[in-house]
Image: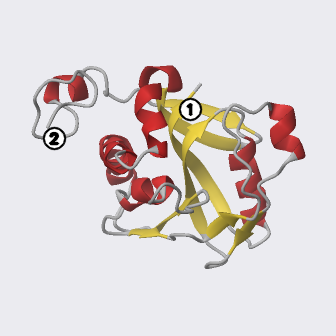
Amino acid sequence: MRCYICNSISLIIFCKRCKESILRPNIRKEVINHLEIYSFYRYSSIEPLLLLKYKPEGFRVLKALANITFKEFIKEFNTDTNEVNVIGIDERVKNGYSHIACMTHQMNIKGVNILHSSLLSKNKINYAGKSLNFRKNNPRDFEYIGRKNISVILVDDIITTGTTLIEAKETLKKYNIKVDFALVLAGL
């Protein structure tokens, strides 16, 4: 097998050198409409890897990125005394798998409940490359089917405008669900 970044021979998806240099997370926090959003990479630094989500091999790449970022974050965040609930944004199957579900699944450690496919959009419009105006005029129209009266962490792959995360937060608020913060792999 070859490293997906440098193409050198590697037994794992990313060689040790690339993991330690290029894929070393740099956590950034931004706040949009009172929602704290933590991202691990700049979009431009891992764009080719993120675009693999549209291909079958994207499953392996996103799983590996989630292990480096989300899994390590949740290990540090999770205290065995508190229940942590995680909701992935729109875990629909596309291209043979759900790219969000494969990332949230990596957070499945003791004390963490992954509420798979509990927040799905009724609108299947693709937001990739669309303007903020387009996103606001074409909401995701989320539907929630899951536990009520809990606190959660939202998970998505990319944040551009924050529209999707804010809409998800507002939908969950109707079910008395408090969104503690959101985690995304990459931000602009």
| Residue 35 located left or right of residue 17 | right
Q: Amino acid at mark 2?
A: Ile
Q: Decide which of 130, 136 is in the foreground and name it.
A: 130
Q: Quadrant of the C terminus?
A: top right
User: How many other residues sit within 10 Å of disc 2, few (<14), some (14-19) or many (≥20)?
Assistant: few
Measure the alpha-carbon separation of dots 1 and 2.
Answer: 30 Å
Number of marks in the rendered image: 2
In x, y percent, where is residue 157?
52, 43
Q: Secondary structure at mark 2?
A: loop
Q: Decide which of 64, 94 is in the foreground and name it.
A: 94
Q: How is the image coloured?
A: secondary structure
Q: Which residue is mark 1?
A: 29
Q: Which residue is mark 2?
A: 12
In x, y percent, where is residue 13?
22, 39
Residue 83 shows in this picture: no
**Which numbered disc, 1 or 2, marks the residue that appears first in the sequence?**
2
